Amino acid sequence: MDIPTSLPSEALRFGPFVLYPQQRLLLENGRQVDLGGKAMDLLLVFLEHPGQTLSKTQLMAKVWPTTIVDEISVRVHMVALRKALGESRRKEHYILTLPQQGYRFVAEVALLQQAAAEEAKTPANLPALLNATLGRETETAAAVRLLSSRRMLTLIGPGGIGKSTVAIRASERVSDHFADGIHFLDVSQLPEQIDLAMALTHSLALDTPHQLPRFFEPLQMLLVLDNCEPLVEQCAHLVERLMRLAPRLTVLATSREPIRAEAESVLHLGPLPYPVACDRLSPTEAMDYAAIALFVSRAQAKMSGFELTSDNLSQVKAICRRLDGIPLAIELASANVDVLGLGGLCAQLDQGLLLLGYGRRNAQQRHRTLEATLDWSYGLLSPQEQLCFRVLAMFSGAFSLGQAMDAFHFDEQARCRLLQDITQLVNKSLLEADSGGEVAKYRYLDTTRSYALDKLKECEQGQMLVGMTEPLTAHY
């Protein structure tokens, strides 16, 4: 027989557990915990009196009100309850045994909605930025300004360009404007095939996705969705639904392509500025370029005696140009300066991207090498888009749509597909577009083109294309 309880009907949370008193259901990280009837009765009694010491006599009176039992029954079911709570595998304990006194439930207990709201009100789940944000002050200020007037902002740009860094820094600066705090979710770290709404539900310690609108509806909150590209369609649907039902919710997203949700504003992040080859600069003047400043800062972290001088300036300029001013590429390259030296670094960069070896040990896998970053973007393309990505690497500089079509002798149907694929490559930040002239021009960043050429040479059709032995129409 179930014992009567004065617990509220709402779910209760303590540690990784959520208890539904009316249903006598206990979940641990969303999974049901197998708990016997009397062990459940004990847990309900403890949650009615959190922080209070309950004697064995009191427990027996509550759990066995109409039955005479001895203290052994209490101990047996207490062992079962502690086992279900996993106390043997945890550092913390939820139930303390007080000799000659009884037991005390010591975990903090909160209503589920209250617990989730308290977590969300603090920006503590924003990842910490351990280094200064070099060269992104303009973009950060622009993001802060847009977040004050727009309900959804997406930062877009190629991999390694610093989207997450700008998003985190901007979020820190606007935190005072969101009374109910900031909640951060890295979409790229979610398991494959997961439902985004369910993932957000779990990260907020809610029970079902149906609770999301009700949770956000009264809150003035900033939701940060980082690296949305793996689940970009789900992001669009979820964001639109939440913004319609939660009028004070603001969303900041990062992605290699626009989310294309209603009311979305887009801020494009380009490479860090770097000097062109013909610029005659002093070391002091060169440090005004963000790419140079970043390289020097990270090189000094590896070699305390490193300085930018008139003698090494040309090599540092060449490295930053070769890396297109991409922050991640510059950081990875500077990590090798103590082993290779500037001259060796320049020589190795000319041989391809594999030189850009491993960065921080705890960095995400796709951020440990530039090749891994590009592998991530390439893997998100459709097979047709991957073919287009490889083929266009044959252009060493800027090209127009007409030049691409003429070079490969496409028929009308293939031309339409090529236009669609080029548009997608631009949208996904793999191809740069310049529409400032009479005719739009497209080009790869040098690092991206080197990667695309490697992919081209890996496949049999790439070997044929390099020799131009047959038109592409058959493949396209």
Image: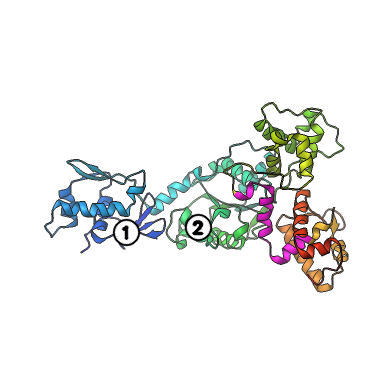
The colour scheme of the drawn protein is: rainbow
Q: Which residue is mark 1?
A: 9
1 or 2: tag closer to the N-terminus: 1
At x 66%, y 47%, the residue is 369
Which labelled disc corresponds to residue 199? 2
- Closer to the camera, 263 or 93? 93
Which labelled disc corresponds to residue 48? none
At x 77%, y 64%, the residue is 460
Question: Do callouts 1 and 2 mark residues in contact (Cβ within 8 Å)?
Answer: no
* In the depicted structure, whether residue 425 falls above or below residue 354: below
- Closer to the camera, 181 or 419? 419
Question: Does dot 2 land on a helix, a strand or a loop?
Answer: helix
The magenta segment is: 365-390
Question: Does dot 1 land on a helix, a strand or a loop?
Answer: loop
Residue type (three-letter) at the residue carrying disc 1? Ser
Dividing the image into 4 quarters, which one contains the C terminus?
Answer: bottom right
Residue type (three-letter) at the residue carrying disc 2? Ala
In this rendering, does residue 181 appear at all?
yes
- Closer to the camera, 296 or 339? 339
Tell me if 133 is positioned left or right of 470 in this view: left
In this rendering, does residue 431 appear at all?
no
Instruction: Give how far across and how far down residue 347 sits, in percent.
Output: 79, 40
Q: How many marks?
A: 2
